[in-house]
Image (cartoon, rainbow, N blue to C red):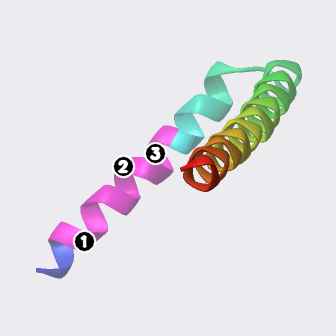
Amino acid sequence: MSKQTEAPSKEISTLSVASKKLYSEEVQAELAELQSDIDILLQQLQSLSSQRLTAVGSAQ
């Protein structure tokens, strides 16, 4: 059973190493910045959605 739980982590580790070899440090930095921007936008969207649900609920 432990072999099953170890396999995914090995795959993730291998993919992480492979992605580091595929992209230069500059591209990795750019991807990290884009991921950060995506996270911020997602938080804003969730906040606006929550505010909208609150406004609709209090209007009824």
**Label 1 Cα crowd, 10 Å radius (few <14 / some 14-19 / many 20+):** few
How far from the left and from the top, in percent, is residue 47? 72, 47
For the residues bearing labels 2 and 3, Cβ distance under 8 angstroms: yes
Find the magenta span and give its range. 4-15
Task: Tell me the element at label 1.
Answer: helix
Task: Tell me the element at label 3.
Answer: helix
How far from the left and from the top, in percent, is residue 23? 70, 20
Numbered disc total: 3
Kindly identify which numbered label has been placed on residue 35.
none
9 vs 8, left or right, is right
- Residue at x 64%, y 28% (from the top left corner): 21
Kindly identify which numbered label has been placed on residue 11.
2
In the rendered structure, which amino acid carries the disc numbered 1?
Thr
**Label 2 Cα crowd, 10 Å radius (few <14 / some 14-19 / many 20+):** few
- Residue at x 49%, y 52% (from the top left corner): 13
For the residues bearing labels 1 and 3, Cβ distance under 8 angstroms: no
Report the residue that reaches farthest toward the bottom: 2
In the rendered structure, which amino acid carries the disc numbered 2?
Glu
- Residue at x 76%, y 25% (from the top left corner): 31
Query: CA gap, disc 2 to disc 3?
Result: 5 Å
How far from the left and from the top, in percent, is residue 44? 77, 39
Which residue in the structure is indicated by mark 1? 5
Query: CA gap, disc 1 to disc 3?
Result: 15 Å
Kindly identify which numbered label has been placed on residue 14.
3
In the rendered structure, which amino acid carries the disc numbered 3?
Thr
**Residue 50 painted magenta:** no
How far from the left and from the top, in percent, is residue 56? 58, 44
